[in-house]
Amino acid sequence: MSARRHLTRGLRFRLTAGYALLFALLLVGTAALFRERLAYTLNSEAHDLLEQEWAAMKGYLHIVPTRGHAVEHEGCGPYKPTWEYDKGDPDEDFAVERLRRVYVLADAKGCVMQFSTIYESIGIEQPKEIEAAVKSGQPVWKRRVSPHGIPYLIRAGVVFDDKHRSAFYVAVGRPMDEGEKILKRYTWMYAALIPLSLLCGCLLGWFLTGRALMPVMQVAQTAQRITGSNLSLRIPTRAAGDELDYLILTFNRMIERLENSFRQIRQFSTDVSHELRTPITAIRGQLEVALFTAKSVDQYRDATLNSLQDIERLSQIVRALLLLSQAESGQLALQKTRLDLSSVMRDIVDQFQIPAEGAHVELSADLPPECAAEVDRVQIERMLSNLLSNAIKFTPAGGRVHVVLRSLPEAISIDVEDTGCGIPEEHIPHIFERFYRVPAPETCGNPEPGLGLGLSFVAWIAKAHGGTIRVDSAPGKGTRFTVSLPAAVAEPAPAEPVATEAAVGPHWDE
Ligand code: ADP
């Protein structure tokens, strides 16, 4: 039962059934149309032939007045109908014979003067009917069926005697059984052909849809084999360039993306455990050494202080990771307000003057007097702090860090450039990944190791604001980070900066 339901619900069955239905409708429709056309043609042919026979009859039949002579049918007027033709000509003889096979002649009052037995069998008209027909003078067409079931087409009308004094009613007919037979034969032929072609159509449809759906089954089977540890599987394309190839391609791309995500997650777990293990091992070592070897209070104090520093680093990592995961999972909503970005940046640059001086790096800024922007103040400050602290950290003493803010019609652009050690090209695609740190070259001095999370956050902030971030770097010469944010919509109200957090957001490397 369930197997049957499974079959009838299947795409293959439904496609075949749909095609079969359409095919059946088309066949029946075409057959009905052809039958209609055929019936019409046969009918009009019969009409034409009968009309010709009627015209011929008028040539052969002569009704002459017979004063004093008896007429063939008692009670009718003094007229004698005669058929005049060349009796020696077999063609004419045959034609007149044919005409008289289904034939009736009556006077204007309905008195029947001549008739054939076939006409009698299909029923001679009532005198009243004949009278009416003669009066109207119009040709009459009708159909009659003989007691043997043979249909006849009758053409009746008015003829005049040779002197043109009186009108007479004449009807001639022809059997229609030949046409009916052709129609019946045609109907039977189609009635037999339709189910046969339907059956062939269904079988062919079943076979073709089965073939067409085969790759879909392959996709499904491959998808079933794919697991978290088996993401390298791909479905081979058939190079047909059709919709199924497109489906396979899309599916393969999806698996590729999944594989990348899985790889990143694995890498991330490895990095996190590595990052957390280092301070934990240090803390453990320091405490063990203090426990077994420390003799004075000062030695205990030193060990505790060192451990506290490592614990601080641990909590920084955890805090940063938590914030980053909240940001990336959309839990950290932006609190956008309209503010003067120029003044925000001026404050940040001022705050970084002291660390810059400490590192003997010249920090300068090129800011317009005012620059309206719709941003989250806390996040933008966090972004600038990260970029500035990196620039100062990776620029050796004597170098320069320069900040430029430009308000363009379609965007706001922020440049943070330094004359520091730069980033080798092969590392640039990875610097926004979590925990990614470029091995510092000799020329770069000895920058304090960071967490490798700052730029991930910077990238998220730029993206969350609908902006982009770009890096241009030349090893040994310097680096420039360019953040592009959407321009603020022009608003008549004055910009009123509202902070969501009072102070400058924490920097991961602080
Ligand atoms: P962190 O600074 O804590 O190491 P980030 O995510 O902020 O982590 O930066 C990732 C890496 O990118 C850094 O370790 C550093 O190697 C490189 N980097 C970032 N900014 C600069 C810069 N201005 N100059 C040279 N290298 C940089």
Image (cartoon, rainbow, N blue to C red):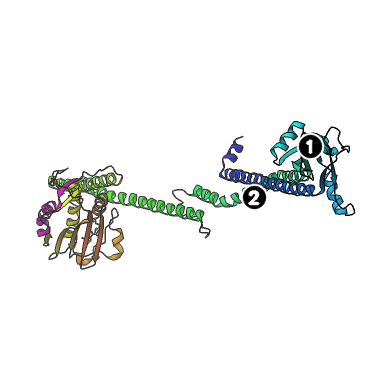
Which residue is labeled 2 in the image? 204
Left or right of 354 in this view: 249: right
Range covered by the magenta-colored residues: 331-358
Q: In which quarter of the image is ligand 1?
A: bottom left
Q: Is the magenta stretch mostly helix, strand or loop?
A: helix
Residue flagged by tag 1: what amino acid is it?
Asp
Is residue 333 highlighted in magenta? yes
Q: Do the residues labelled 1 and 2 touch (CB within 8 Å)?
A: no
Residue flagged by tag 2: what amino acid is it?
Leu
Which residue is labeled 1 in the image? 107
Q: How far apart are marks 1 and 2 (CA)?
A: 68 Å
Q: In this view, does 204 lie above or below 127?
A: below
Return the residue nearer the eye: 353 or 180.
180
Is residue 302 highlighted in magenta? no
Q: Residue 361 at what x, y percent from top left?
A: 12, 62
Q: Residue 250 at what x, y percent from top left?
A: 45, 53
Q: Residue at x 27, y 65 (%)?
A: 424
Q: Examine the rendering and report whether any part of residue 233 can be seen.
A: no
Left or right of 246 in this view: 291: left
- Residue that lies at the very extreme toward the front in this rendered image: 67
